[in-house]
Image: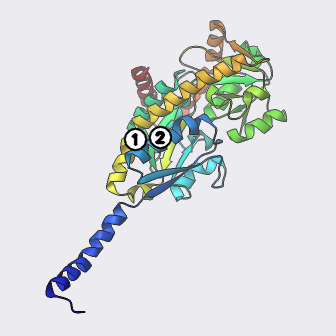
Amino acid sequence: MTLSRRHLMAFGAGVLASPLVVRDLKAQAQVTLRLHHFLPPASNGQQRFLAPWAQRIEQASGGRLRIQIFPAMQLGGAPPQLFDQARDGVADIVWTLPGNTPGRFPRIETFELPFFASRRAVTNSRALQEFGEQHLAEEFREVKPLCWWAHDHGVIHANKRVARLEDMAGLRLRFPTRLCGEALRALGAQAIGMPIPQVPESLAQRVLDGTVVPWEVVPAIRVHELVRYHTEIPGSPTLYTATFVLAMNRARYDGLPADLRQILDANSGMVAASMAGEAWDAAAEATLAIVRARQGNTITTLPEEEVTRFRTATRGVTDTWLRQATERGLPAERLMADARAALQKHA
């Protein structure tokens, strides 16, 4: 068999072009990112936020960018290690609470001050995202923050009824953040810090008398099955909120093809923060309905005069934070003013 000059030229052109074809195929290859978090797969955080968010990104990328979720610390480690797992590349993305490592992220603590945040998650989340873009880049420089958000109003769940300030005395309550712990101590409780996955067993074994968590997480850790009494602090600002971050390994982010980075960016920031806030508020309403319908559970709403007493008792926590943050060189008064302005804007 002989090859014509035309065939040889076509073959040679194909060989020369093949690196371009390979590069094009590589650019079109599917990328899978591993997302690690601390709650069960049935939790509100995964079902109402992380899974829909991942699906949205996969659809926008035509299936080229997938996010595989590993709940309940399936990739190993403990919840306080999640941020470092994103920094070090153990996971590509993590969902975590900055409050799991007290004192490490002092600027974001502004939103965790007692009686500071809104009772609505969507307000807190949008305000915190705006605040983060203003003030948190340096604090989270070791990772690529995809979004920040904060939950709705925290609720006191206990094995006895809390209807006034005196009922808090001596209660062993789990707290989620450093400042919430300080607030509970100011209210007379024994504040105990622990990661949330440990709460159900601690309640069952009476290591704890109760916990403070928002309604949305109650079913995931069976709080309504383990204690009977739930106390709401009405109105805004509320007793406390906890802040969250969706953080990505920076090298992994930088290594994505440009078009996939654009898709990730378009679905991060305020878009993702709003999704999270709306999910938390919707889950709170659904959980309230479950608890109200459950025989034996009692929901108490503090009267206005008791809310005033709670606020007065915790005022020193804010004063101490303001002084200590200023001593650390932080613009504490400006942080509080900008956070309040963002909360008012998104209320």
- Horizontal relation, residue 62 to residue 48: left or right: left
Residue 119's spot in the image, x, y percent?
A: 54, 20
Viewer-closest of 239 and 104: 239
Q: Is residue 347 above or below residue 255?
A: above
Q: Residues within 10 Å of mark 2 (few under 14, many from 20)?
A: some
Q: Residues within 10 Å of mark 1 (few under 14, many from 20)?
A: many
Q: CA distance from mark 1 to mark 2?
A: 8 Å
The image quadrant that residue 273 belongs to is top left
Viewer-closest of 278 and 168: 278
Q: Is residue 278 above or below residue 272?
A: above
Q: Which mark is residue 267?
A: 1
Q: Which mark is residue 53?
A: 2
Q: Can the viewer see residue 106? A: no
Q: Residue at x 46, y 27 (%)?
A: 336
Residue 261's spot in the image, x, y percent?
A: 36, 51
Q: Can the viewer see residue 347? A: yes
The N terminus lies in quadrant: bottom left
